[in-house]
Amino acid sequence: MSKQIKDTLSPASQPLSKQVLTGVIATVLVVSAEKLIQKIARQPLLVFGFGVVSGLAVYKYRKHILETTSKTLDQSKTLVLEQKEKLLDLIAEVNESE
C-alpha cells in the first residue's frame, strides 16, 4: 500500500470520513424524497389518501402526542430556567472578581 492510502485509512481520518459519508447519504435521501414527493403531488387522489392516513394516525395516537409534547415543553422550561440561573451566577461571579 502506498503511504497516501495508509494515511487515508488511519484512525484520525475516520471521523471526517464518517461525516462525509453521512452528508452523502443525507443528500441522496433528500433528493430521492424530493423526486418522490413531486411524483405523488401530481396525483391528487394519492395526496388525499396520505392526508386521510396521517389524520387517522394522529387521531389514534393523539393522547401520546399530547403527553410527549407537554413533557417536552416542561423539560424545555426547566432547561431555560437552569441556564438563566447559571448565567446569573456567572455574571455575579464576574462582578465579584472586578
Image (spheres, rainbow, N blue to C red):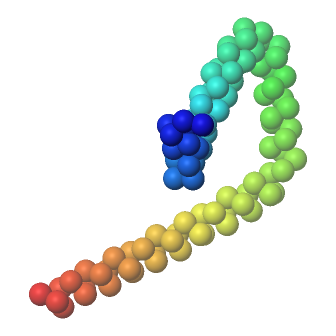
Q: What's the residue at 80%, 57% (across, down)? A: 64
- Outermost residue toward the top in this view: 42
How many marks overall?
Answer: 0
Q: Is residue 68 visible?
A: yes
Point out residue 3 in the picture as x, y percentages from the top left corner. 51, 40
Furthest toward the bottom, the residue is 96
Q: Quadrant of residue 40?
A: top right
Position above or below: 39 against 63: above
The answer to whether residue 83 is above or below residue 69 is: below
Residue at 85 percent of width and 32 percent of height: 53
State the image coordinates of residue 18 (x, y, percent, origin top left): 59, 44
Q: Name the foreground residue: 5 vs 39.
A: 5
Q: Nearer the viewer, residue 51 or 19?
A: 19
Query: Where residue 87 sits: x, y (%)?
Result: 33, 76
Q: Nearer the viewer, residue 33 or 47?
A: 33
Taking the spot 84% from the left edge, 29% from the top edge, the residue there is 52
Which of the image's four quarters has the N terminus? Answer: top right
Where is residue 38, by image quadrant? top right
- Left/right of residue 32 with respect to residue 48 in the rendered view: left
Question: Left or right of 35: which side holds 45?
Answer: right
74 displayed left or right of 66: left
The relative height of residue 64 versus residue 2 in the rendered view (above or below) is below
Q: State the residue at coordinates (30%, 81%).
A: 90
